[in-house]
């Protein structure tokens, strides 16, 4: 009798898991509240493994979105999935990695996303001098735990893969710009540098949970700094220090 009960419970458990594993993703997503302006087209698969052919937000396509939930983490009280997104995006965004939700909140691990720097500049305040920039920005998050408004903790890097920046006077060769990211209790910090035959630079920026920010940066003309640009340095609001560095400081609130 006892053996039959155990066998029956085992069969029932397998049946329940099988039913859940085969619930169509469209059935679930169609009944979920979505952020205003978000539209899902061409949902396929199951809740465990599926695809959205096109994910749009405010009329702009973010491309496809594939996911595969890792069921083993459900035993640890987590919902974790491997995702890949961006193919067909209007913004040419690409990304992949691990995202999840635990009792501590949303998180990401080994997450990579990239997009053309020109798309990012749409959301950056305009600069006083027109510049022509190219290349891609790549975000690499080793770990990230969300907490309103920014993050509870996080560690990663930003890389701007580019060759040069164009100005009305001339172009300036930069090469890759690399920055380290860190976050602790909603204090977000970025520290980066760049070096080429024409210019060297470094910057540090901090964004606090209350929306206030500070930034310090410097650049130093190198041996092959373009002569046409060197003539324009006299118009800068700051003069070089003893090491030949032009230093700048900013602070404000978002």
Image (cartoon, rainbow, N blue to C red):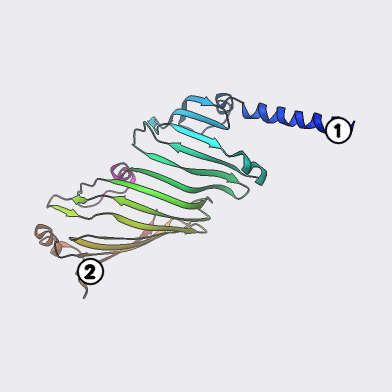
Say which quarter of the image contains residue 12: top right
Q: Magenta span has 122?
A: yes
Label 1 secondary element: helix
Say which quarter of the image contains residue 120: top left
Pointer 2: what residue?
Answer: 245
Q: Magenta span has 133?
A: no
Earlier-in-chain disc, 2 versus 1:
1
Left or right? Give the position of 92 relative to 47: left
Image location of residue 99, percent across then percent down: 52, 43
Q: Is residue 130 above or below residue 187?
A: above
Give the camera-side residue of 161 and 213: 161
Pointer 1: what residue?
Answer: 3
Residue shown at 79%/31% (left/top)? 9
Label 2 secondary element: loop
Image location of residue 28, percent across then percent down: 59, 27
Left or right? Give the position of 215 relative to 234: right
- Bin the neighbour count of mark 1 within 10 Å (Cα to Cα): few under 14, some 14-19, many 20 and up: few
- Extent of the magenta region: 116-128
Q: What is the residue that sits farthest to the right in this orientation? A: 1
- Bin the neighbour count of mark 2 within 10 Å (Cα to Cα): few under 14, some 14-19, many 20 and up: some
Residue shown at 13%/49% (left/top)? 168
Image location of residue 204, percent across then percent down: 35, 63
């Amino acid at each position: 009798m006892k053996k039959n009960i155990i066998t029956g419970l085992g069969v029932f458990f397998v049946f329940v898991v099988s039913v859940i594993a085969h619930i169509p993703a469209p059935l679930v997503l169609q009944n979920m509240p979505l952020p205003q302006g978000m539209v899902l087209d061409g949902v396929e698969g199951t809740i465990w493994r599926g695809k959205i052919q096109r994910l749009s937000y405010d009329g702009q396509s973010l491309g496809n979105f594939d996911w595969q939930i890792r069921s083993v983490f459900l035993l640890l009280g987590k919902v974790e999935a491997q995702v890949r997104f961006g193919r067909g995006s209007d913004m040419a965004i690409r990304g992949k990695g691990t995202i999840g939700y635990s009792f501590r909140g949303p998180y990401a691990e080994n997450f990579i996303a990239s997009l053309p720097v020109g798309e990012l500049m749409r959301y950056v305040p305009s600069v006083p001098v027109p510049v022509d920039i190219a290349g891609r920005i790549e975000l690499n998050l080793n770990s990230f735990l969300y907490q309103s408004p920014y993050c509870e903790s996080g560690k990663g890097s930003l890389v701007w893969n580019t060759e040069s920046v164009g100005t009305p006077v001339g172009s300036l060769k930069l090469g890759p710009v690399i920055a380290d990211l860190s976050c602790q209790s909603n204090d977000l910090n970025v520290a980066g540098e760049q070096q080429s035959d024409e210019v060297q630079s470094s910057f540090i920026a901090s964004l606090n949970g209350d929306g206030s920010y500070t930034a310090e940066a410097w650049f130093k003309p190198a041996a092959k700094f373009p002569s046409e640009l060197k003539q324009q340095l006299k118009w800068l609001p700051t003069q070089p220090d003893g090491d030949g560095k032009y230093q700048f400081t900013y602070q404000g609130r978002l």
